[in-house]
Amino acid sequence: MAILYNTDQNLRERASSCIENDFKHNAIETAQETFYVKRGQLVEEMPDWEIIRDRAAAIRNDVTKNLDFYVKQFAERAEANGCIMHYAPDGEDALWEILGIFADHGAAHAVKSKSMMSEEIGLNEVLEQAGVDIIETDCAENILQTAGDKPSHIVVPALHFDREAIAELYRKKRGYEGSSVPEEITHFLRSILREEFLAAEVGVRGCNFAVAETGSTTLVTNEGNGRMVDTYPKVQIILVGIDRIVPDLEALDTMMCLLPRSAVGAKMTAYFSVDSGPRKPGEVDGAEEVHIVIMDNGRHTLINTEFEAMLRCCRCGACLNICPVYRHITGHGYGSIYPGPMGIVLTAALEGYDNLGGMPFACSLCGACAEHCPVEIPLHDLIRQHRINMVEEHKNNPVEVPIFKGLELMWSNRAVYGTAMAAGRPIMKALADGEKGAMDESSAWIPIVKGWTSKRDFDVLAPELFRTWFKKHKKERNAGSEEGGQDR
Amino acid sequence: MKIALFPGCMVDMIYPETGIAAVNVLERLGCEISLPDKQVCCGQGLVNSGYADGTRSVAKNTIKAYDACKEDFIVSLTGSCMNAIVNDYPPLFEDDPVFSAKLRSVTSRFREFTQFIVDELGVTDVGASFPHTVTFHKSCHSTRLLGIKEQPLKLLDNVAGLQYIEMEHADRCCGFGGTFSFKEPEISGEMVREKCRTIIESGAEVVTGVDSPCLMNIKGALSRMRSTGELDRDIRVMHIARILDAKE
Ligand code: SF4
Ligand code: SF4
């Protein structure tokens, strides 16, 4: 599957190389800072934010609980609007359906806008192999496509590039001759994309929310290229994840109240389109033929499991924007096209535990993601649940098993604990720097503590347990109060 | 008032001075304290690493120890351990009605140290004096997951001579995360260094908190930064109990 793209390295290797990449690391930190402030201000302005969150979570739960009903309703209404429906149980089915549409039209040229699902199934590569020229038209996606890179964020996928790097990239790959001023780069991009829009036979795009009651699909963008993809080519292919459905326009309104605010700290995006079918007689623009591919690709397997809540996710990226781990290891540290907190939960739920390279451990369980998630997904609990499942399925690191067994024994038995403390005290003391009373970098040869002491000092065991002191204290106090009694 | 104390194993093993300070403060406020000797650790390190079965045996030991105490409140000196008991234990005993019932009787009596003083004893001024600039690390588990936000700050506010300075992103994770800091030390190391930078930038002389593990992490990193020359002054790291016990 294409969700995972870096299984050659494990978490530690991926994380280290991302942490060392100062540029990427700083870019993400700055972006997080900006989103944090902007989102915070907007949420502050909305006293009923929590009420809307509750409502959104309830709407999304309702869809999950009645998924078949809503998928059917959406499909029927969209068909009634004149769309051609395709149902794809998994990614491969979706690819076949899409290749079929291209073949039917003998199309060799396509433009594309915003679709995580297409990333998930590796659509670009498959189309290119089939001889189709497919161009990403959103700025960030175009940068990634040109660079042959992977997204580092689900909303702002090229967050890890700066304008210098972008200008250089276009100079090298697309004959750009201008400066690194963003407007100039955008202008250049616009000029090359115009040609593409005009030449394209097929437009491929994603869908933020699909409205069951009206059979409509929606698209949220800030650049407007999505609308060009929507209107220029004669044939339209819209990829819809089954978890993208909302019941009606009112529910859409609720979700749209949360999505841009959570995503980038904006009240609304520059462009928000609601599409309901192909061009009607007398209309001047829009595709003549609209295909909607509804994809499941493993999502239904989450229903009635501990990960069901993940189907509420609206891909706003708020959890990435707040996560202190994402902040440092950046999107590429996770090795999945879905990074950050939502990425851990979703990737592991869809892919299983074999090829994750430790991804579920890229989390300190701080809970910031859950606090910020507009649909109240308890992300940190779900991440921990993945770890529990991994241990149950023996997908944990075998080296650690006896260590945890030992800890279990010590932590559940006062006598073992007392003995271990008594034995550990002189050992730690001997290893510590006498003046600091802590183990420093000189203890970096000891396997378990070496990671810790490479970055910080480790305080050693106190000469006496607190509970030992407490017993003596209790005795003295009791004796004292008895004496006090005699005095009186 | 009679209370049972839950120090958390880190206070027990490494920072008894925190436990002693807490006992002093609570006794001054008229509490009679008991400490079940059998209890050892909450097992958070196990559950966070996915060892549900192992956690159950550790948890049973904790639950039994505190179920045996009949005091009205169990006062915790460590927010994250309390969070493990209150929020992480229940799902582990869903299929065990006997322990679920015992657990409920334990969790309903649990209060974090500052929460207990402010909400149950109704005290916001414990009569401490500590003439220093202090910044407060808002630990994830106590602040965010247990919702203890106002209480520690109210108490600090009434300490004579104390000047409170808020650090940037005071509620950002310090990167300890229990076994996380051992299993992923590179990521954790980045996180704690960033936390320390915000502490240093605040200009405070002392950093405090309600959670010993976070404080251990921060103290270790500040100490290393001091020895490598990245930090040019001493910043004291103290559990809030020690500040509330201070008479400087
Ligand atoms: S709980 Fe984990 S994933 Fe969520 S914000 Fe904290 S570190 Fe990130
Ligand atoms: S998990 Fe929540 S915060 Fe993260 S992308 Fe999904 S909806 Fe947004």
Image: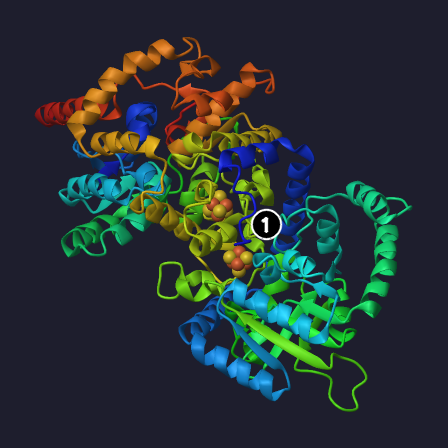
Query: Could you say whether the residue bearing mark 1 is in a helix, strand or loop?
Result: helix
Q: Is residue B187 left or right of residue B114?
A: right
B235 above or below B108? above
Q: Is residue A199 left or right of residue A441?
A: right
Q: Would residue A282 be visible to someone looking at this image?
A: yes
Question: At x 60% / y 64%, what residue is drawn?
Answer: A259
Q: Would residue B146 be visible to someone looking at this image?
A: no
Query: How far across and down, in percent of the image, does residue B199 sit?
Result: 56, 31
Query: How far across and down, in percent of the image, does residue A49 sit?
Result: 54, 64
Nearer the observer, B110 or A380: A380
Mark 1: few/some/many CA within 10 Å (<14, 14-19, 20+): many
A116 above or below B236? below
Q: Which residue is mark 1?
A: A321
Q: Is residue A137 left or right of residue B215?
A: right
B12 above or below A313? above
Q: Residue furthest left?
A: A486
Q: Amino acid at mark 1?
A: Asn
Where the C terminus of chain A falls, by quadrant?
top left
Q: On what subunit does the disc labeled 1 rest? A: A
Query: How far across and down, in percent of the image, does residue A420 sit?
Result: 23, 21
Figure quadrant of residue B126: top left
Query: How far across and down, in percent of the image, does residue A76 sit?
Result: 54, 85
Question: At x 46% / y 44%, what residue is drawn?
Answer: A356
Question: At x 62% / y 55%, what residue is drawn?
Answer: A39
